[in-house]
Amino acid sequence: MKKVIPAIGLMASVLLACGQDQQEEDAAHGLEGKDWDDIVSEAEGSEIGIYMWGGDDGVNQYLDEFVAPHLEEEYDITLTRYPMDAPDFLSKLMTEKEAGQNEGSADLLWINGENFRNAKNNDLLYGEFTSHLPNMEDYIGDDAPFVHFDMGTEINGHQAPWGNVQFAFQYNSDMVENPPETMEDLIEWAIDHPGQFTYPNVNDFTGNAFVRHVMYHVADDPEELETFNEEWLEENKEEVFDTLRTFKESLWRNGQTYPESLSHLDQLYSNGEVAFTMGFNEHRAESLIEDGIFPEATETVVLEPGSISNTHYLSIPFNSPEPEAAMVAINFMLSPEAQIKKLDPSMWGEGTVLNAESISEEQVQEMEQITGPAIVESEDILPELDSRYHDWILEHWEREVVQQ
Amino acid sequence: MIFNRKKAAQAVWFTGCILLFVAPVVIMFIKSVSFGWSWPEWRPDQFSLRAWEVMFRDPALSRSLYVTVAVGVSVVLINFLIAVPSAYALSRFSFKGKGVVEALLMMPILIPVLAIAMGMHLTMIRLGLTDRITGVILIHLLPTLPYAVRVLKAGFDRLSFDWEEQSAVLGAGRWTTFWTVVVPLIIPSLRSTAVLVFVISLSQYVLTAIIGGGKVLTLPMIYYPYFNSADEAVVAGFSVLFALLPIAFLIVWEAVIKGYLFVIRKP
């Protein structure tokens, strides 16, 4: 009992502090005492821009042909897409911050992982805003871990989850007779079929995620990696890199070189040079087959010990000229309507962040109709690792694997 | 026999040129309209206009073509305004500190553009030139001007001063001499400068992205992100479109030159 009281006291003071921060932040943003309706009416007639990667026609189409017209119609907000990579727009924001430019050029950012960490640490974001969004509360809730942490970085309402994808492998069933079921099978398969498997360089996000799966494979229990665990890394470093070295010689081009990006691996795969490719978004093969990029015989598989999930987010830059309209736009993109439309493989075709319990029976059925049976079973889902693991892999892989 | 050898050499040269310059564009075009064409098939068995649909579905594409050409042409014109007088001066006169001026003019291509761009960005924010087409045009002078000065200076160097003296002896003023004698004689240099500058401006991505902030949407801003996808057909389609712009520019530029020569030759 004695222990409980200080704990409650501590919690209460933390909660109080949070409440206070919230009030201060709202005051700084001029949102004090405003409810959602005020924000919506203030957003009316605004023109906003979003910085986002522009290299996927499905994603672009979803923004241009679904999100933008709906925002125009329902809220009288004009949304323009500015194609730019996250590191590029972050360095731009950084310079703007230095120059003290408080009237920026965009209102929304598509961001996650280490880019979010950098943006948050350098105060490039607007601040806490998700608590104002009704759809955040109604359809996403507070339970999912991705609401609180993005690759180990505390979110504090600085960004709102937009989509959720799972890591999966794609293979050409004409080339692979007995598809592997575990990471161990895959490694064996690679050794038996020299030159037909490879993974992207770890500088690439997907290549790095492949190595993170190998780490999960080495770990006895996924929980060991739940938080950034330097001790574990110390102890298991050899085993992780040993595993990668065991099949290095059998990789494409004898492991002398690795595809420098996922797009390169995808091209090798579509040309039939390798039998496997991989990537976040378990549904990504569907539209690629439809567009004639991947072979018809492409199948998707999740290997034991499971599939890392990855969430990407929407945020608002510190110098957004129209933060109210940005919030309205984000709120719309979190609505069941927009989230369900995003599942459609003929456009984007990626996972939702909706809490299945908060939406209607009909909506759940609609979602199942669009996506078909689940590719990744819920018990196979592995939490995304702290972004410091990402850095750790970057630091050691080259020396431990490539140069050996 | 000699005649035949000459003909054969010509044929080899001609084939070489086609293989090097025309064939890649043709292959790109075929790639952009093929469907599921992959190794080891030597030709596509299915065709589809999907890639071109994807490109033209982007509402920003037509505007970006217009912006790209507007930026490119302005950069070429400003380059002429600055480079012709400076190249002329560097070639014709010797003055104190000429070496320093020449070195300074070469600086932008010796120092990594990205390093300059970061610093320029800060200055341009203060001047209110970012996110505007004016800023993008100005920043494109950075990687183009050194080449323009170099090429034009070489042109003036080859042109003997005698021609200008002759014109002066015949009673022409400085401006008349310049427009009717010097300009027609350095047209080859003007031609290569214009095309070189246009192509360099056309292919700028990083500078346009940083200074234009994604708001000044040139073709590379839409086109380059697709390199990050497995969609080879769309990349091929954009590449064809990209290759057509300098060709169109060259044709228009030739017409301008022909028109100019026609006008000054009139008595």
Image (cartoon, coloured by chain):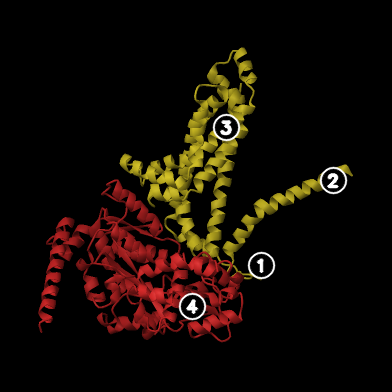
Disc 2: which residue:
B5
The residues bearing labels 3 and 1 have C-alpha atoms spaced at a distance of: 45 Å
Label 2, residues with CA under 10 Å away: few <14, some 14-19, many ≥20? few
Label 1, residues with CA under 10 Å away: few <14, some 14-19, many ≥20? few
**Mark 4 residue type:** Phe
Colour of the chain lettered B = yellow
- Discs 1 and 4 share one subunit: no
User: Which disc number belongs to residue A169?
Assistant: 4
Mark 3 vs 1, N-terminal side: 1
Q: Nearer the viewer, mark 2 or mark 3?
A: 3
- Discs 4 and 3 share one subunit: no
Disc 3: which residue:
B152
Is the Cβ of the residue at disc 3 closer than 8 Å to that at disc 1?
Answer: no
How far across and down, in percent of the image, does residue A188 sit?
A: 55, 83
**Mark 2 residue type:** Arg
- Discs 2 and 1 share one subunit: yes
Tag 4's secondary structure?
strand
Q: Nearer the viewer, mark 3 or mark 1?
A: 3
The residues bearing labels 1 and 4 have C-alpha atoms spaced at a distance of: 29 Å
In-image side of A295 versus A16 (left or right): right
In-image side of B134 versus A30 (left or right): right
Q: Chain of mark 3?
A: B
Label 4, residues with CA under 10 Å away: few <14, some 14-19, many ≥20? some
Q: Which chain is red?
A: A
- Discs 4 and 2 share one subunit: no
Tag 1's secondary structure?
loop
